[in-house]
């Protein structure tokens, strides 16, 4: 079989500016993405370097034009030229260097001043994840900084390749989503991109709901469950309506929003995706405080993940969350031939806890909206006597 000519199959092109301080690993990041290469020797970028990579994004071939800018202040004028015409931005810091992380605020300020539009997909990347034993910037600290600034966040290792392709896959998906909504210009079209509010499609027949400051209720919902049960896939499917087949472990926590229309009221949802890795157990409990509801996820093909749900429920009770609305979701229902958790038995168990249960598939979207909207309805009924905006602590 002859190799596929990827260039002839490219359907979209994306210009990405990669910026950050010197020695944070920007060039190594791009070398790993484009050539699966890594070098321990440091070679500073002079001005700007260029490389490219064609990614298969949900069956579409997307060409990324990657502009590796110098971290030296004397070359900022070069970086500004590329920032003005970029379709997406990647800011890079070194997880072992707190100063490189603190500098992110300056880089964000530069992008905000120079970019042709503020509403452009942006990603904050912490490099050198393989040096976790020397880590000076925690993942949770970085996410808490990134989210209010409108940046997605992920940690990677250019040395081992961990999360490198996944990071740019997520960025490319976001650019395609923005383009589908008419918000990001195509390559070569130099007029400014349109500034827009985020739009999330919902089940109401009247049309999409625009995510913005005007809403009746604001709810914080936590996704809990062991590793690899599909919490992140459920969040992506519900909030952004896409599914990524590869597994990317959540480091600490992640976060998305969606605004829905229910019974004539706009309800904004903050969906917090908390890592199932045991090393985050103590941090996870800190996120219980201020949460309005909980979604407990297990994998229908893994009986151990179902058994862990009861432990999580007991933990929530001991943390003062016994009255908070909850729902149990059995994910990966599309893998019925590998099922080890019988739904009727799981439903009998859930009845004992007086908690609703539903099976979903993040892959084919089966019951995903239904699962989330059941918990929203429970929250709305709980708060029915009041008609005001609920801000979270």
Image: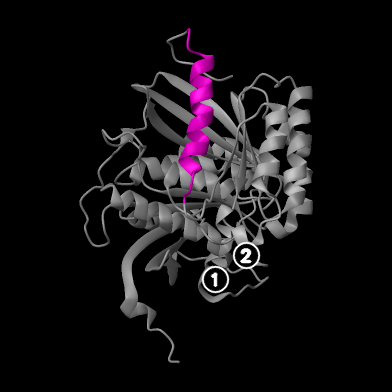
Q: Are marks 2 and 1 in contact (CB under 8 Å)?
A: yes
Quadrant for residue 206, please give it: top left
Specify whether residue 64 is painted magenta: no
Residue located at (21% from left, 58% from top): 189
Say whether residue 153 is visible.
no
Sequence-wise first label, 2 or 1: 1
Outermost residue toward the top in this view: 385
Query: Crowding at label 2, few (<14), some or many (≥20) Cα neighbours within 10 Å?
Result: many
Label 1 sits on residue: 31
Quadrant for residue 210, please give it: top left
Name the quarter where the C terminus is drawn. top right
Up/down of 371 relative to 130, above or below: above
Across and down, in percent, residue 53 comes to 44, 71
- In the picture, the disc for residue 158 is 2
Across and down, in percent, residue 314 comes to 78, 29
Specify whether residue 384 is painted magenta: yes
Q: Which residues are magenta?
A: 365-385
């Amino acid at each position: 079989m002859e190799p596929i000519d990827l260039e002839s199959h490219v359907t979209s092109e994306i210009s990405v500016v990669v910026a950050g301080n010197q020695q944070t690993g920007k060039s190594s990041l791009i070398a790993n993405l484009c050539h699966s290469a890594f070098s321990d020797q440091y070679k500073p970028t002079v001005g700007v370097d260029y490389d490219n990579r064609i990614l298969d994004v949900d069956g579409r071939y997307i060409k990324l034009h990657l502009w590796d800018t110098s971290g030296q202040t004397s070359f900022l004028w070069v970086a500004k030229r590329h920032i003005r015409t970029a379709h997406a931005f990647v800011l890079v810091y070194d997880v072992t260097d707190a100063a490189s992380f603190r500098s992110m605020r300056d880089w964000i300020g530069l992008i905000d001043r120079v970019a042709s539009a503020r509403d452009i997909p942006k990603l904050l990347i912490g490099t050198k994840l393989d040096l976790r034993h020397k880590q000076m910037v925690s993942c949770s600290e970085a996410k808490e900084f990134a989210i209010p600034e409108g940046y997605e966040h992920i940690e990677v290792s250019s040395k081992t390749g961990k999360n490198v392709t996944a990071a740019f896959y997520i960025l490319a998906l976001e650019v395609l989503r923005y383009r589908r909504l008419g918000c990001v210009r195509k390559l070569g079209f130099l007029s400014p991109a349109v500034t827009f509010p985020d739009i999330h499609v919902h089940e109401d027949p009247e049309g999409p709901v625009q995510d913005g400051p005007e809403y009746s209720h604001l709810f914080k919902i936590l996704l809990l469950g062991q590793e690899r049960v599909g919490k992140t896939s459920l969040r992506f499917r519900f909030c952004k309506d896409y599914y990524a087949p590869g597994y990317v472990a959540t480091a600490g926590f992640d976060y998305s929003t969606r605004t829905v229309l229910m019974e004539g009221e706009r309800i904004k949802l903050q969906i917090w995706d908390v890592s199932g890795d045991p090393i985050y157990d103590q941090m996870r409990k800190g996120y219980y405080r201020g949460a309005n509801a909980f979604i407990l996820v297990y994998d229908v093909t893994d009986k151990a993940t179902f058994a862990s749900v009861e432990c999580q429920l007991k933990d929530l009770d001991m943390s003062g969350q016994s009255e908070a609305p909850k729902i149990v979701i059995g994910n990966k229902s599309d893998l019925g031939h590998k099922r080890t958790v019988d739904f009727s038995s799981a439903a009998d168990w859930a009845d004992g806890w007086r908690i609703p249960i539903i099976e979903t598939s993040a892959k084919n979207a089966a019951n995903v909206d239904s699962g989330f909207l059941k918990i929203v309805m429970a929250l709305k009924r709980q708060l029915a006597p009041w008609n005001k905006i609920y801000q979270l602590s």
